Image (cartoon, rainbow, N blue to C red):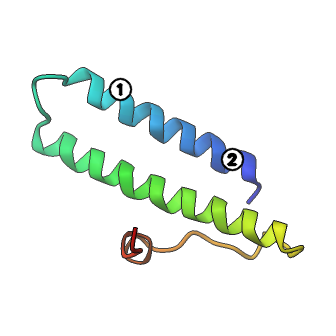
Amino acid sequence: MADDPLRERINALVEEEHQLRERHVGQGLDDAERERLRHLEVELDQTWDLLRRRNARREAGQDPSPEAERDATTVEGYLQ
């Protein structure tokens, strides 16, 4: 996977997240919307993680193509 599709995916996810939050300012989200928001956050974390690892391999003079998206449990388990 090339990096441009990853960046486009990140932008689309961020846009959807912003639209969801803006539609409900002051009203709160229903259960389905909260679940969708949580899914968006996880997918963003996974995509950012993949992009960062690809960049790290490139900076180390390695081929970034072997990198693949990690599962949500792994990505969400990182310490901040």
Query: CB atoms at circles 1 and 2 under 8 Å apart?
Result: no
Q: Is residue 37 left or right of residue 47?
A: left
Q: In the image as oriented, which residue stretches furthest toward the front?
A: 80
Position of the C terminus by quadrant: bottom left
Task: Give the camera-side residue of 44 and 78.
Answer: 78
Q: Position of residue 53 (x, y in %)?
A: 66, 69
Residue 29 x %, y %: 14, 35
Dot 1: element: helix
Residue carrying label 2: 5
Residue at horizontal 37 percent and vertical 36 percent from the top: 17
Q: Residue furthest right?
A: 61
Q: Which mark is residue 19?
A: 1
> What's under tag 1, amino acid-wise?
Gln
> In the depicted view, which residue is nearer to us: 33 or 59?
59
> For the residue carrying disc 2, how many other residues have a C-alpha within 10 Å: few (<14), some (14-19), or many (20+)?
few
**First-in-chain label (1 vs 2):** 2
Callout 2 amino acid: Pro
Q: Residue at x 37, y 30 (%)?
A: 18
